[in-house]
Image (spheres, rainbow, N blue to C red):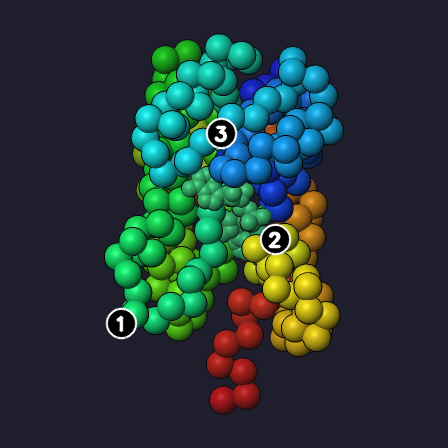
Amino acid sequence: MFNGSVAIVTGGESGIGAACAKALGNAGAHVVITYFRDAAAAQQICASIGDASRAMAVQTDVGDEAAVTALFATTEKAFGTATLLVNSAGLNMSGVLLADMELAQFDRVMRSDLYGPFLTCRAFVRGLEAANLKGRIVNISSIHERAPRPGGVDYDSAKGGLSQLTATLALELAPKGIAVNGVAPGMILTPMNQSALSHPAELRAKEAAIPWGRAGQPDEVASLVSYLLSPAADYITGTTVTIDGALSLTVAQGA
Ligand SMILES: NC(=O)c1ccc[n+]([C@@H]2O[C@H](COP(=O)([O-])OP(=O)(O)OC[C@H]3O[C@@H](n4cnc5c(N)ncnc54)[C@H](O)[C@@H]3O)[C@@H](O)[C@H]2O)c1
């Protein structure tokens, strides 16, 4: 489906990003993944796609402007201009209430979850414009872009901003043939939910709150992302697709 395309997947060393990288790679794309800390995991993901002519990993802090510039330059040199972008890198909420939250904590999550997509989308669009190419972006948001939680002022603010970044860019970039969509997962079993993965009772309790009766798997998100990046989704831009087993609909029940 993606034969010959060049895809960049941020946060590709783990969880949803890793699943997206594998799905795109297995469907024929050349894939560049970013990793933050775990070089070995990143190499393993790349090896599962193919040799160095098919996949490579670049250490990148997505909130660092120079690092993102270097990521796109490296990609261009290795594989050519990227026409597919998945922004999956991100940190979860801290659980710290506002009065106790250090600015550095707020800044850390804003940098990974909002500045990161701003910087990668900008570099991506600049590359497409220079090469006169069209492209597609998927930003991995969260149901918490709309559903707030106490202790989530860092994450909820960043994902709320990401939702508007996605919508604004969709309008701005439609005339250039660049589609921008969001995917808003609910509970997906990745290291971001390590506590539930490690504690069966916690997992059971959380899954009991999900109308569909279970948490999601990273591969299920990757299938949706692949579709949104594919030619079959050509007319889809400016929307965010929720993938949460109806969890986000469970507000104000029984009132
Ligand atoms: N797992 C869930 O239940 C869930 C639910 C909703 C949304 N999401 C979103 O999905 C995305 C992927 O999360 P996941 O579940 O795969 O978690 P994960 O922890 O497995 O992966 C997140 C990745 O982002 C990387 N990262 C963090 N900060 C970074 C930075 N500044 N620069 C570069 N990389 C950085 C981490 O190293 C890691 O590889 C995140 O944006 C997350 O907010 C996840």
- At label 1, counting other C-alpha atoms closer than 10 Å, the crowd grade (few under 14, some 14-19, many 20 or more) is few
Horizontal side, residue 55 vs residue 161: left or right:
right
Viewer-side residue, 45 vs 255: 45
- At label 2, counting other C-alpha atoms closer than 10 Å, the crowd grade (few under 14, some 14-19, many 20 or more) is few
Q: Determine whether label 1 and label 3 are within 8 Å by CB.
A: no
Residue at 33%, 26% in the rendered image = 66
SS under mark 2: helix
First in sequence: mark 1 or mark 3?
A: 3
Decide if residue 83 is in sight here.
yes
**Ligand 1 closer than 8 Å to the CB at disc 2?**
yes
First in sequence: mark 2 or mark 3?
A: 3
Viewer-side residue, 128 vs 200: 200
Viewer-side residue, 79 vs 229: 79
The amino acid sitting under disc 1 is Ala
The circle drawn on residue 99 is 1
C-alpha gap between disc 2 and disc 3: 19 Å
Residue at 35%, 64% in the rendered image = 153
C-alpha gap between disc 2 and disc 1: 28 Å
> Mark 3 sits on what residue?
59
- At label 3, counting other C-alpha atoms closer than 10 Å, the crowd grade (few under 14, some 14-19, many 20 or more) is many
